[in-house]
Amino acid sequence: KKLLDAEAKNAQLRQAEKLKREFNQQLADVEMKALKAQMNPHFIFNSLNSINWYIIKSESEKASLYLTKFSKLIRLILDNSNHKIISLDQEMLALRLYLDLEVLRFNEKFTYSISIQPSLNPLAIGVPPMIIQPFVENAIWHGLLHKESVGKLEIQIDTMPGGIQCIITDNGIGRKKAG
């Protein structure tokens, strides 16, 4: 009887652990969807306003360039949102499109560079979609846009024990001054 009780308790513990893992995964999924829902409408609104501004100013080449990059980015975001994990290559493509749009929108108020450690294969590394963009957006809005001179944003992808790391640096005014 004691053996049966111990086996039943172990089965209950395994079931509880499984439920906890499933709950944590669902929570992470909901948090990611909430983050995307906050970013996308705001970004889409600003992008459409920028396109409209270029049209009003009769800058059709800039409007066309912006619209082309914007449509590529939106398509990529929609495609990637169907996956929990995408390649680092796809994530960098979306990030570059996002940054190109922000550079255009803010009249080249900043420049950017992205470097990936040569030993890394961006096609073979999986990451959640839109994992880096919120941090980059924060650096732009709270540091670089407040600068008097042209800002510089650097994104570096390196290896670290057990995975990769993304280091985002900028020469902005800093969080304390940005408020």
Image (tube, grey):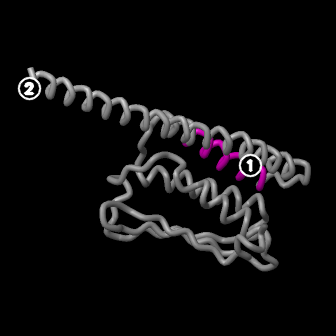
Left or right of 103: which side holds 76?
A: left
Tags 2 and 1 touching, CB below 8 Å: no
Disc 2: which residue: 3
Q: Is residue 168 above or below residue 81?
A: below
Label 2 packing within 10 angstroms: few (<14), some (14-19), many (20+): few
Residue located 15% across and 23% down the image: 5
- Examine the structure image and report whether residue 14 is included in the region drawn in magenta: no
* Residue at 66% over, 78% down: 171
What amino acid is at disc 1? Ser
- In the rendered view of the protein, which quadrant contains the N terminus? top left
Q: CA distance from mark 2 to mark 1?
A: 73 Å
In the rendering, at what x and y percent does residue 52 appear? 85, 46
Q: Residue 146: name its quadrant.
A: bottom right
Q: Residue at x 54, y 48 (%)?
A: 130
Which label lies toward us, 2 or 1?
A: 2
Q: Which residue is mark 1?
A: 64
Of residue 2 and residue 24, the one placed in the foreground of this image is 2
54 relative to 47 in the view: left or right: right
- Of labels 2 and 1, earlier in sequence is 2
Q: Residues within 10 Å of mark 1 (few under 14, many from 20)?
A: some
Residue at 90% from the left image edge and 54% from the top image edge = 57
Span colored in magenta: 62-76
Above or below 178: residue 59: above
Depth check, front residue: 174 or 96: 174
What's the residue type where badge 2 is placed? Leu
x, y percentage for residue 145?
Answer: 77, 68
SS assignment for the magenta stretch, majority = helix
Dot 1 falls on a residue whose secondary structure is helix
Q: Element at badge 2? A: helix
In the rendered image, residue 80, in percent from the top left (x then y), is placed at 50, 40
